Amino acid sequence: MPQPVQPAARRRKTVFFSGRVQGVGFRYTAKTVATGFEITGTIRNLPDGRVELVAEGSHAELEAFRAALHDAGLAGFIRDEQVIWGDAKNEFRGFEIVR
């Protein structure tokens, strides 16, 4: 008897983007790009000039979303990315910009 297919484990990916990432439409572009992926999360500006992205979904979906952010024209603004992986906490509904 075949085993039931398990859904891909949901993961949490936190990314701190640095560079010229504030005031260039970074958060709005990320929110628009997020609609094409099965992810939930938030994106916000930090007082130190970085942007914090917290997203949850399957590992593959999160990696594809991150690549899509670069392809959406944001790569030129990013100098560095600090990535932290963890277990999903399932606390988000949709993908939102936090102010």
Image (cartoon, rainbow, N blue to C red):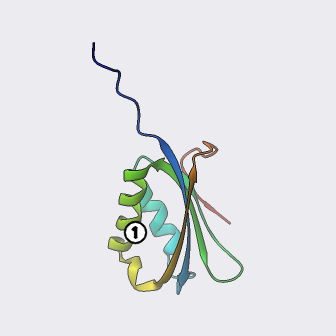
**Which residue of the protein is positioned furthest toward the top in this rendering?**
1
Q: Is residue 90 visible?
A: yes
Give above or below for 19 relative to 86. Answer: below
x%, y% of residue 14? 57, 62
x%, y% of residue 38? 42, 46
User: Looking at the image, which residue is at 36% across and 77% down?
Assistant: 73
User: Looking at the image, which residue is at 35% across and 71% down?
Assistant: 72
Q: Nearer the viewer, residue 32 or 70?
A: 70
x%, y% of residue 9? 46, 40
Q: Is residue 36 visible?
A: no
Quarter assignment of residue 15: bottom right
Image quadrant containing the N terminus: top left
**Residue 41 in the figure: left or right of residue 60:** right
Q: Nearer the viewer, residue 10 or 40?
A: 10
**Which residue of the protein is positioned furthest toward the left in this rendering?**
1
Give above or below for 84 relative to 38. Answer: below
Quarter assignment of residue 17: bottom right
Mark 1 sits on what residue? 69
Q: Secondary structure at mark 1?
A: helix
Amino acid beneath label 1: Leu
**Which residue of the protein is positioned furthest toward the right in this rendering?**
47
x%, y% of residue 61? 39, 52
Quarter assignment of residue 91: top right
Q: Nearer the viewer, residue 6 or 47?
A: 6
